[in-house]
Amino acid sequence: MKYERIDRQLYIKNRQKFTSKMDAKSLAVFNSNDIFPISADSTMPFQQHRDILFLSGVDQEESILVLFPNCFNEKHREVLFLRETNEHIAIWEGEKLTKETAFEVSGIKTVYWLDQFPVIFKQMMAEAENIYLNTNEHLRANTEVQTREDRFIEKVKLEYPAHSVKKSAPIMHTIRAVKDQIEIDLMQRACKITEAGFRRLLSFTKPGVWEYELEAELIHEFVLNRSKGFAYTPIIASGGNACVLHYIENNQQCKSGDVILLDVAAEYANYSSDLTRCIPVNGRFTDRQKAVYNAVLHVKNEAEKLLIPGTYLADYHKEVGLIMQDQLVQLGLIDATDIKNQDPEWPAYKKYFMHGTSHYIGLDTHDVGLWNVPMEAGMVFTCEPGIYIPEENLGIRLEDDLVVQASGNPFNLMKDIPLEVEEIETLMNQ
């Protein structure tokens, strides 16, 4: 990994949070992700499963974490199983964690090699009555591909049918949603890397530039600052492309008079940032573009004020919809008749603002977190309203990442990234 080592106290605290919510006589198992194949001998770059990473800091394939807080053998209350390194692996793949470095990273004293897992796990299961299994219960998850975790769950249910099965997901969604200060600092660093990339584009963009050239400028800046790259597939959408919410082709030439919607952000140490900005190709917004831009900015500013402890996400989104409705009326995009005749399940404003305003963000860009609990201090959300007008070849979305505070407005991790029309135009024309 490119990032600097993270204070292991984060992972010690995270494990304590998880085990404090476990039932007695229970153990929990967390597996790393697979290295996913493409074809022949090609693979995707490794991405660690966020849950084992959150609990241990181990950013390595073929790893298993077992938590058994009531185990009679104190050595087995926290156990890591790692792939044993050797000279061949060191030559072909590079350095892997040793037992000593695994302790330095995670704070876990008991580390075994992976080939010892079947025997030791059987001993632990003989004492346990319940097992927490880590299913993917994100509401937007695509679970078509079987993971290493999925295979383990199938195997353990077959081999230990008398044990009661419990879910890790509700606990993980609860504890991962509220960020430790160490995590917020890592996310802030990701946001600063994103800022460097965006500022680079302001001086680079001009009529005739290609969307993929902007993508190249960003990846250069991100990697230069110790990021692996984009936190998610970048959206660099000029003109009418901005009205396609998940436009990722990035293969069109940017024309004078168009606006580019940039939904692009860096990761750092596996923590995401998530930014959207819109800039004029020629450095100047038209009056109409500016009016739509400022309408979105108004909605964003008002929506941020609602990101406070006690707010439920469902109620929040309804309130933001009403703020957007007012702006669309002022822009002449909808009128009182549209509102009067609207379908309550799909309000009139949805024609031009069809997505949600905020989502959890953290180790995943669309991070885990519960929608049936109120917001609390330490949660981090995006705020990203937008207006999309295909007939005008114009889509505007503005997005920042915000930390909910115990009192007052949220803290904006992206407060230093240019946002106002005048600032963007000034920087583009220097």
Image (cartoon, rainbow, N blue to C red):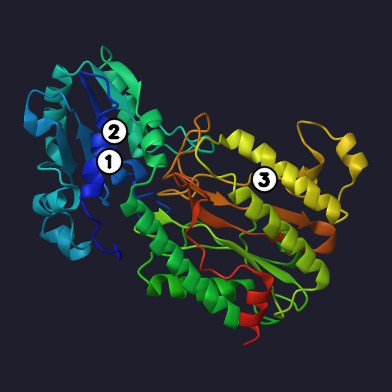
Instruction: For marks 2 and 1, give the CA distance.
Output: 6 Å
- The reply to whether dot 2 and dot 1 touch (C-beta < 8 Å) is yes
**Residue 44 seen in the figure:** no
Amino acid type indicated by mark 2: Phe
In depth, the one of 378 and 71 nearer the eye is 378
Q: Horizontal and vertical percent for residue 278?
A: 66, 67
Mark sitting on residue 355: 3
Mark 3: few/some/many CA within 10 Å (<14, 14-19, 20+): few
The picture places residue 420, in percent across and down from the top left corner, at: 65, 69
Image point (55%, 36%), residue name: 311
348 with respect to 95 (left or right): right
Residue 108, placed above or below residue 422:
above
Indicate left or right for 415 with 424 as reference.
left
What residue is shown at x 26% (from left), y 51% (from top)?
60
How many numbered discs, if any?
3
- Choose top left, top right, bottom left or bottom right for residue 316: top right
Q: SS for tag 2?
A: helix
Q: Is residue 216 above or below residue 261?
A: below
Using a 10 Å C-alpha cutoff, classify the residue at mark 2 as few (fewer than 14 neighbours), some (14 to 19) or many (20 or more): some
Disc on res. 14: 1
- Residue that mark 2 sits on: 18
**Inter-mark Cα distance, 2 to 3:** 33 Å
Looking at the rendered image, the quarter that the C terminus falls into is bottom right
Instruction: Name which residue lies at 50% across and 51% down.
Output: 410
